[in-house]
Image (cartoon, helix red, strand yellow):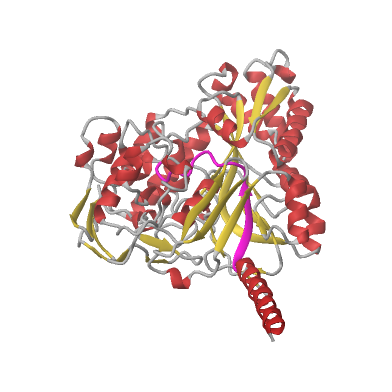
Amino acid sequence: MISYCKYLIVLLLIVVSCNTNNKDREGVLTINVGTEPKTLDPTLNAALDGGIYIGHIFEGLLNKKQDGSLVPGVAERWDISDDRTVYTFHLRTNAMWSDGKVVTANDFVYAWRRVVDPKVASEYNYQMEILKNAKEITEGKLPLDALGVKAIDDFTLEVTLVSPTPYFEQLAAFQTYFPVREDIVEANPDGWSLDPKTYIGNGAFKVTERKIDSRIVLERNEYYWNSSDIKPNKLIFILTDSYSTILAGIKDGSIHYSSLVPVKEFNSLKEEGYIVVKPYLGLYYYNLNLEKTDVLKDVRIRKALSLAIDRNYIVETVTKAGEVPAAAVVPNGVLESSGKDFREYRKNYFSVEKEDYEKNVEEAKKLLAEAGYPNGEGFPILNFRTDPGEHIDIFEAIQYMWNNQLGINTTIMTEEWAVFQTSRNNGEFDIARNRWIADYDDPVTFLGVFLSRSAFNNSRYKSSTYDNLLDQASKTDNQQQRMQILHKAEDTLMEDLPIIPIYYYTSVQLQNPKLKGIEYSTLGTLNFSKAYLEE
């Protein structure tokens, strides 16, 4: 009898153990969206990969759904004044941080003041310029407490805008407007976001493991007000840009999703059902250094370099994911206040039709000769700087075009992602690859990048005409007039051409066919909070 009981106990333990192990494996998704991020601080992050992590760990006043609609986040409701310049957000009382403390209006006040603080130097501080006094604060003319945001009480936040801004509610769902905890940040301003013990968020997940250059592990935040609606128990983000590792993981099921797609394997992966293609509001372009590279200060040379690029060859032969050749800054799909596409009014600033490429090359040669470099004679060797991946394949094709058509020689310097971002921001390049993905559905999300005061203006483009047009647009109540001003601003930018537009994006991902429920956005964000593996 005793031995039989022992047998039953052992058997029971085995069954419980097996069930526990199976349970541990349920709701775990393994994801790859890039290598080690530059930062996970919502105030300082300016990269899409960092934004994806942050979007799972923090939550703003509002949330943006896959269809673009806005729904309550920390704010359960909000009121708007008759002149649409004052918003009053009423915060839910059950919104909590991952350590169990309640989210208050003061958390937003602190976070927003931190963004505009000149000492913090957030690259996204210009996104706050729609708030009263924000621009004057970043310029050091007014104190932080002059910012148009205040806590009426713990659960009421009042926001005052400079003028009616049709995209403000979209920004209220954007990472730069997320709350952060003053007590935590001030205790360790440089390192708080690196340690899971201090990286406290208010979103659906919390960080439980952070291994630099290896992985970031998120687990469901039990204090999140809507935790019962979250499907995965754990998200494991693998930090790598190794295509062989990603490809092997996708095929053996150890990796469920990756935003890095090996271009050379695109067709076969598509046939095997691993490729997902989605719409994407994004521009792939090259920065031209107008500050340090003398030859690029001549607009004729900048235009020659642009015209000599066969964009159809790039999208059809190199990238091969349905991208559209770009001959402007604002892509198709960005809507005006009337609901019409911004690009409808002026399609392109130069032809990207296949049959016109030779004409473009002839015009490029003419411009180069006028600038004093006939057939590229005496033209200095330019350096192209990039991070690894498909960017090298794209530039090698362009490198050949410039050499073959214009007689211009270039070199390539490759750096790891975080290092490259710093080099590009510091202007340590002649030409650098770049991209911009919309933060909200309005032309300003693209045009604002090239303001002389923008931290993302890596070309160091300075035009008082351009700045004045965008400032004028920000203060205009009449939305039809505002769009006319923004068209003039794009006209100015494309005439000066401080960048070379290459193509408009599509979003291409590697995905396990069993993975369902990802919320995609045309802004490039990804939400895995409803994702699951189909049996």
Q: Which sits in the foreground, 508 or 251? A: 251
Residue 342 seen: no
**Identity of the residue drawn at 31% across and 39% down:** 116
Give the extent of the magenta segment: 27-43
Taking the view exactly as shown, the residue that stands out farthest to the bottom is 1
Q: Specify the farthest residue to the front.
A: 2
Return the residue nearer the eye: 354 or 438.
438
Does 157 sit left or right of 254 as displayed? left
Q: In which quarter of the image is residue 531?
A: bottom right
The image shows residue 4, relative to residue 191, as above or below, that is: below
Residue 32 located within the stretch drawn in magenta:
yes
Query: In the image, 481: left or right of 401?
Result: left
> Image height check: is 453 above or below 409?
below
Q: How many marks?
A: 0
**What percent of the width, then of the height, locates residue 323?**
67, 51
Residue 110 is situated, as x and y percent measured from the top left of the image, at 28, 45
Q: Quadrant of the C terminus?
A: bottom right
Residue at point 64%, 25% (across, down): 367
Residue 336 part of the magenta-drawn span: no
The answer, for residue 389, to whether it is visible in the render is yes
Left or right: residue 135 versus residue 400 is left
Viewer-closest of 356 and 398: 398
Frontmost residue, 483 versus 229: 229
Q: Indicate the position of residue 392 as horizontal and vertical percent values.
A: 72, 36
x then y, percent, for residue 341: 50, 58
Q: Quadrant of the N terminus?
A: bottom right
Residue furthest to the top: 378
